[in-house]
Amino acid sequence: MELHKNELLQIHITGMTAEGFGVGRIHGIAVFVPLTAPGDIAEIRIVKTEKRFAYGRLEKLITPSQDRTEPDCPVFAQCGGCCYRHISYAAELRIKEERVRDALTRIGGLSDPQLKPILGADSRDGYRNKALLPLGQGKAGALQMGFYAVNSHRIVNCEACALQPEEFRLAMNVFRRWAEQYGDPVYDEASHSGTMRRLYLRKGEITGEIMVCVVVNGNGLHHEAELTRMLKEALPTLASVVINSNRERTNVALGKKCRTVYGSSTIRDQLCGLEFHISPLSFYQVNRGQAERLYLQAAEYAALTGAETLLDLYCGTGTIGLSMAHRIQKLIGVEIVPEAIENAKKNAESNGIHNAEFLCRDAAQAAKLLAERGEFPDVVILDPPRKGCGADLIDTVVSFDPKRIVYVSCDPATLARDLKQFARLGYPLIEAAPVDMFPGTSHVETVVLLSKGEVDSKKIRVEFSLEDMDMSEFQDGATYPQIKEYVLEHTGLKVSNLYISQIKRKCGIGVGKNYNLPKSEDSRQPQCPQEKEKAIREAFKYFGMI
Ligand SMILES: C[S@@+](CC[C@H](N)C(=O)[O-])C[C@H]1O[C@@H](n2cnc3c(N)ncnc32)[C@H](O)[C@@H]1O
């Protein structure tokens, strides 16, 4: 049976995708429907069909899921920021925990991963200490500021975001007023013209210090002094106003150059009883309260005795390692962003920590350098960006022969991929603990312990069968929607299932025997253009499929 565009059908939603779309099956075909929830029985209209799945639009709820709640945000349906404001927090946590388990079994090949119950947050709202808000021009010329709609670069205008603290609402308000009177032209992505690209806000939750940064296509703004004056009036704890220059024609949000217009070039916050200085370009966990819980879990897994050398790879401003520095002999932190390393050194000094060394390098290169220096850390902490660690780094980390490896990840798919390699090299997963760092949104963090030694063979069996899986329409590794999302996010290109399946064939990755093959020898199927092939291959690499 096939599904047809515009068909009106009934569906029972049984699961949720990583992007936060409800998913159910009609005639055995998976249908993804935004704004639905597991347990919903709904009337939907098919809006797009692919060979093995389809997208639907919610038309009418017939029987709502018991998990449903009334969304408390006026732009929830349009905004790509949150995807769970229509269900209870308990249901959100259940879905996220299941997502981690699913990645560990489906991608990581673990038949029965040891998973702790997910660590939920005290509050779903007001937790974000950082917001990077794209700016645009509305139809009537008004400033647009908010988040992008799902899978697009269309700005959903927002006056106040529930995830953010009150000071960000005030800063946004001031910026709008200032822009109306004094603002430079808003940046236009298509023509790469105009000046104001983003409003970037940060808050030190404990100190209350606020940083306001404007990202510009150029060197500055014509009326910076006016902006500072208006911000100071509205925000008594304003500590820093910064201009970030980003002249690149890319989706990368921040440029490399910052100029402080007012106050300090950093703001301060406290984490695990220590004080941290944070530059605009340095990574800092967006949910401070949950970061403390995550670090506590990481410390428990690290099981430090006081005698160890601890290697903190991807250390940012040094937060994880420094929070454990009093329980070790020596800390080595590695990070690629120079400003973050400067912060880390200052953070060690201002907290009176003298057993730390920080290296500004690529993690894989630094690990090799340490091996050459004959430094063999006893415990390694890894906290990479979403793309994960990569094979080279994993090899070097294993060559240190550490007692324990603690891996903190913000992407269950790449975590699972990397765990598979660690397991092959003798470091199986002992336990994983999901932590909800980003309530309301689709993201979930996980901290895991890997260790050598005798482990129950049942827990580390690395094999799986597609037939066992509930989501059997998916191929090995990432799903087609995940690949599409990755490609769109990283290159701005839209790729079809046909193109993905063509490149899968080229790479020797299994696709269904007749999946997307031309119906006859001489039928003229469009061929994936080179640019898209490159982007799809990058996505395959990212998900560990090649
Ligand atoms: C998820 S953050 C973790 C930061 C820190 N551990 C924390 O908890 O705040 C990942 C960090 O890795 C850094 N990074 C990205 N690619 C890197 C690379 N190839 N080598 C070293 N560091 C890298 C980023 O700049 C960022 O600070």
Image: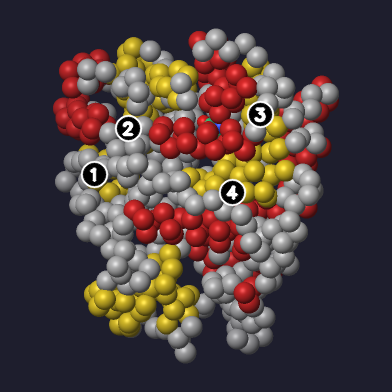
Q: Residue 261: x, y in percent?
A: 34, 15
Three-letter code, disc 4? Ala
Q: Please name the residue that numbered disc 3 is placed on.
A: 304
The 10 Å Cα crowd at callout 4, few under 14, some 14 to 19, many 20 or more, is many
Tell which residue pokes out farthest to the bottom in this image: 1
* Residue that badge 2 annotates: 199
Which secondary structure lies at badge 3? loop
Can you tell which of label 1 and label 2 is closer to the viewer? Answer: 1
Residues under numbered marks 3 and 4 in contact, where contact means CB atoms less than 8 Å apart: no
Work out whether 312 lies above or below 451: above
Question: Looking at the image, is 160 positioned above or below residue 75?
Answer: above
Q: Nearer the viewer, residue 545 or 522?
A: 545
Crowding around mark 2 (Cα neighbors within 10 Å: few <14, some 14 to 19, many 20+) is many
Q: Which residue is mark 1?
A: 158
48 lies left or right of 141: right
**Is ligand 1 within 8 Å of the beta carbon of the residue shown at mark 1?**
no
Residue in view at x 26 percent, y 18 percent: 237
x, y percent for residue 338: 57, 21
Depth-wise, is mark 2 or mark 3 nearer the camera? 3
Alpha carbon distance from label 3 to label 4: 18 Å
Q: Earlier in the sequence, mark 2 or mark 3?
A: 2
Q: Quote the CA–CA distance across marks 1 and 3.
A: 46 Å
Q: In the displayed structure, does residue 341 sit left or right of residue 171?
A: right
